[in-house]
Each structure stands twice: as structure tokens, then as C-alpha cells.
Amino acid sequence: MIDYVSLNSFCRFLDLVQQGISEKVALVVNLLGAFVCGFILAYIRSWRLALALSTMLPCIGITGAIMGKALSKYMQYVDIPLLIPRISQFV
């Protein structure tokens, strides 16, 4: 027998996830495009300064990897089914 109440709440949760991801994907693509375009223009305009500033990219990457690992470790302790009623209050 199908529990339609839990199925309905699950579908609403998936809809919220889809709405959240769709906005974030467009924003990430836009910001990455601006970042790459900025570096291309910087190398065209002043390649020595751009090369000096490019040494910061590994630091940014390492920091992002550390934050990603910490976030994934933290998300293990979050109970998603308990968050569904709280999320639905804001919709």
C-alpha cells in the first residue's frame, strides 16, 4: 500500500531542492564565466601582473577543498527528515 501523505511531502521536498539547485547552477556558471573572462583579459592587458596573481589560485583551491571536506563531514550529522517540516514552513 502506498502512503500518499509521505509521497506528497517527498515530492514537495524534491521540488524545493530542484528550485534551489536551478538558481544556484545559473549563478555558478555566471560567476565562473566572469572569473575566466577576467583572467583572459588580465593576461592580455598585463601578463606579468596576471601571472603574479595566478599564484593565488592554488591557495584558493586548497581552501575550497578544506571547506568542502568540512561541510561534508558536518552534513553527516544533519538529519534531513527532521528538516523537511521546517523547510516547508517557509514555502
Image: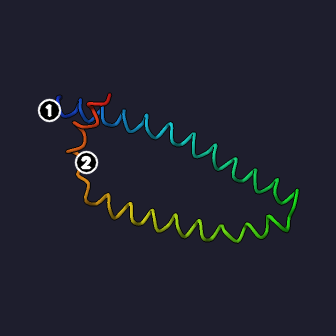
Question: Which residue is the site of mark 2?
Answer: 80
Q: What element does badge 2 sit on?
A: helix
Q: What element does badge 1 sit on?
A: loop
Q: Residue at x 32, y 61 (%)?
A: 74
Say which of 8 and 25 sits in front: 25
- Pointers 2 and 1 in contact (C-beta within 8 Å): no
Label located before the other in sequence (2 or 1): 1
Residue 91, picture quadrant: top left
Q: Residue at x 39, y 60 (%)?
A: 71
Say which of 74 and 26 sits in front: 74
Check the image and report above or below for 37 versus 76.
above
Q: Name the residue at the left extreme.
A: 1
Say which of 56 and 88 sits in front: 56
Q: CA distance from mark 2 to mark 1?
A: 19 Å
For residue 27, side relative to residue 3 (left or right) = right
Q: Counting other residues with Cα less than 10 Å from the Cα at mark 1, is it few (<14), some (14-19), or many (20 or more)?
A: few
Check the image and report above or below for 48 versus 84.
below
Q: Residue at x 32, y 57 (%)?
A: 75
Q: Name the residue at the right extreme.
A: 45
Question: Which residue is the site of mark 1?
Answer: 3
Percent across and percent down for residue 73 are 34, 64
Percent across and percent down for residue 82 are 20, 45
Q: Which amino acid is tagged 1?
A: Asp
Q: Which amino acid is tagged 2?
A: Ile
Percent across and percent down for residue 85 are 22, 36
